[in-house]
Each structure stands twice: as structure tokens, then as C-alpha cells.
Amino acid sequence: MAPGFFGVFFGEFSMNQQNQKLYVGNLNFDANEEQVRELFGTYGKVAEAKIVMDRFTGRSRGFAFVRFETAEDAGKAKEALNGQPFQGKTLVIDWARTEQRDGGAPRSGGMGGGGGGFKPRRDFGDDRGGGGRGERREYRGGGDRGDRGDRGNRSDNYYNR
């Protein structure tokens, strides 16, 4: 057995498997898997047609994945159906990509990046200023917490009306 046999074999298998699968976007929410299978079946033998459903409502999310038995059939279907109308909507068809999830990374949204790095503490212990927050606030013209400057009384905000 040649070194790396399993890696080569499984790598080729997943690559062929991937080249057979299409992403079908902008799908009508009322379309069902049988209709999608029938539409794509005119271009080759469909191994699987799967409409992605919302897990909370049980309704279609408006896209599907179609896997053909051969990559050639998938390519023919992609070329022929991309941009074509189906049940009143223009289809968007592309090669499916593998699902890539990073461990605990958020899928969307998130809270932004970290910001920072090393920030040395500036406590020199003499009269250079900047030692504690009180000195910095006074230097900037702040005052105590009761002083809000020109912002007015904050208790008169929207929620207290």
C-alpha cells in the first residue's frame, strides 16, 4: 500500500462528491423536494434533493442542495438553470461549498474584535499626573459624577416620560 493512500483516496472521494453537489438559491418558499428533483432530473440522475428548512418554523429557508450521480450532469444543470425562472423566482445556482465551522466562533454577528494588547500601567507615584482616574478626569474638565456638563439631567431620559 502506498504512503498516504487513505488521504488520497478519501480526498478524491470528497472532491468528486463536492463536484456533484449544487447550491440552489432564491428558491420559491412553496417549492417541494419532488418539484426540485423533477426540474434538475432533466439534466441527469439526481441522487439527492434537499430543501433546507427553518428548524423553528418548519418552513423552507428558500434554498436547497441537489446532488447528482455524476459531476458532468451537475455541470450541465448549473449551466442550463442558473438565472432561469422557476415558480416565479429567478434561480441562483452555484457549486456547493463544504460547511466550514470553526470551534466556538460565532456564525454571524458577534461582538467585534478584541482591541488591545499590552497596556502598561502608568502609576509613577509622583506629580506627573495620570496616576489615578480622579486626576485625569479633573484635567479634562470633568468633575464628579453629578456633573454632566451640557448634557442636562440624565434622569429625564426617554424611559422616565
Image (cartoon, rainbow, N blue to C red):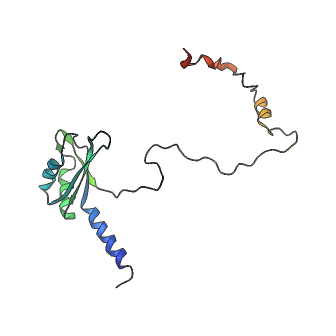
Given residues 148 and 49, the one toward you in this image is 49
Residue 40 drawn above or below residue 125:
below
Q: Position of residue 101 (x, y in %)?
A: 42, 55
Residue 16 drawn above or below residue 110:
below
Tell me which corner region of the image, top left, top right, bottom left or bottom right, holds residue 122. top right
Position of residue 115 in the picture relative to residue 78 (left or right): right
Position of residue 9 in the picture relative to residue 140 (left or right): left
Position of residue 39 in the picture relative to residue 109 (left or right): left
Q: Quadrant of the N terminus?
A: bottom left
Given residues 24 and 59, the one toward you in this image is 59
Residue 34 drawn above or below residue 5:
above
Position of residue 34 in the picture relative to residue 64 (left or right): left
Residue at the bottom extreme of this rendering: 1
The number of numbered discs placed on residues in the rendered structure image is 0
Tell me which corner region of the image, top left, top right, bottom left or bottom right, holds residue 76. bottom left
Residue at 43% x, 45% y is 108
Residue at 76% x, 47% y is 121
Q: Position of residue 78 (x, y in %)?
A: 21, 55
Residue 5 drawn above or below residue 109:
below
Q: Position of residue 161 (x, y in %)?
A: 54, 14
Tell me which corner region of the image, top left, top right, bottom left or bottom right, holds residue 57. top left
Residue at 69% x, 22% y is 148
